[in-house]
Image: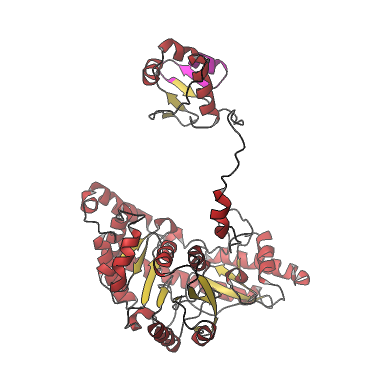
Amino acid sequence: MAKTVSSYELTLGACPQHQTLTRWLYDELRLAILEKRLAPGTRLPASRDFGRLYGLARGTVVSVFERLQAEGYVSCRVGSGTRVNRVAAVSPTRARHLTPPAYIPGVVSGYARPKPWIGLPRIEGVRPFSMQQPAIAEFPAKLWGSLAARRARQFTSWLQTEDDGRGYRPLREAITHYLASSRGVRSSPKQIVIVSGVQQALDLLSRVLLKRDDPVWMEDPGYFGASIAFESVGAKIIPVPVDSEGLSVSAGLRMCPQAKGVYVTPAHQFPLGMTMSLERRMEVLNWASRAGAFVIEDDYDSEYRFEGQPVPAMQTLDRNSNVVFIGSFSKMLFPSLRMGYVVLPPQLADYFLAFRSRTDFRSLSFDQAVLCDFIVEGHLGRHLRRMRNLYASRLDALIAGGERYLKGLLKISGVRAGLYTVGFLENGMNSRRAETAAAARGVEVFALDRYTLRRQDPKGLLLGFAAFDEAAIRKGLIQLAAALDQNVSAAV
């Protein structure tokens, strides 16, 4: 049993009238043990200290401790003190059914609508072909730990840095240089704001740029995190179809030419994977310039392109400050890092910061300083080069295995980029039925129709490959083939 010392004052309820202090203290301590507020192994203060802390006679405390020991709630040993035992949980004596306040249904109604993850088949552990994480085992954890230890010893090097709400300035400078070289992004550190990830960036941008009923273009199918952010402010989502060149601007103009903005993933369209053509990028920018609209460019996983030349960001073509560029280090390094960035047009930066300050007064963090060192000392570049080679080989294994095991069942896309790929069903099944059948075989895939807004079911699945070696990929493909073949007769 883990042993800890109770170094915090335990909150005790008021003593009811006409109840003895001994009975009151017994009931309070017993309840705290049953509710696990006093965890098993916790050492209680000495009876004399306990009495002084709560204004009780030492004899009262001793009497209560002895009764709790007799009933098995605590153990008292000379030299070890009084420790809480592990006891079976029971319903607390104070438990009562509470009626939700009347305001809750009205407040949460907008969030209670079905979301893409609702109804996902539950699979324990990380199974092929989960998209939730990169190859964490390949991350240089010891190196990261040494950088963190060095920063911890020199905490004033970042703790006392001036904080203007944008984040650790040396990190913003490092990101500026990194984006300029790898993505062609034109920016200065003053235009960059550090956030916890893409979702926080979308949430803040939605509240800054949109009002209730404002129309905003979104790729269909597209990233549900963006639709959640837009819906949360009451914006009207205009689902614009995508084709082989990306978002169809002509379709958007027919549907809503005066939209306030657009969210796009031009480097690697989510979820279908194509790269937006140069002609289509210029159409988006020209429309935004004419309409006075914003463009949110989500540059997720663009670092992982396995053939051809790197595709510059759309932001590099922007001459009218319409593009807001967002990205994240979470999938690039490890998900729990929770670090992203927003590259804002100069005219928008101060408005964005003023809005953010309503909820987040200080944006510096220890992780920002460690990440800065990781980038500046060249570790990020080396890590990305290594992971590109690894991920390319894993994608090759997935594509080759798909041709061998999934022929006639699922056609895997030939797009060579990212940390996941898409496969289109050839056996007559719809996306959701195929997802469920795969889950029954211990294979985690996402149905494409979870990402559609108005479009008909594309009848496909998303398969992550980054976290799995070739043996795991082969085993997963065999199981997926069995799932899809077994259920083909029941397809609808």
- State the image coordinates of residue 181 (x, y, percent, origin top left): 30, 76
- Residues 263 and 316: in front is 263
Q: Left of 341 or right of it: where is 105?
A: right
Q: Give the answer, above or below, for where 20 lies relative to 420.
A: above
- State the image coordinates of residue 391 (x, y, percent, origin top left): 47, 70
- State the image coordinates of residue 438 (x, y, percent, origin top left): 66, 64
Q: Give the answer, above or below, for where 315 lies relative to 105.
A: below
Q: Left of 470 or right of it: where is 42?
A: left
- Residues 94 and 87: in front is 94
Does residue 439 appear in this view?
A: yes
Count of numbered circles in the view: 0
- Residue at screen point 51% across, 73% down: 270
Q: Left of 196 or right of it: where is 362?
A: left
- Residues 135 and 237: in front is 237
Q: Give the answer, above or below, for where 363 lies relative to 71.
A: below
Q: Left of 290 or right of it: where is 469?
A: right
- State the image coordinates of residue 332 (x, y, percent, origin top left): 41, 65
Q: Is residue 278 magenta?
A: no
- In the rendered image, the quadrant that contains the C terminus is bottom right
- Residue at screen point 50% across, 63% down: 232
Q: Is residue 75 magenta?
A: yes
Quarter occupied by residue 453: bottom right
**Which segment is the magenta one?**
64-81
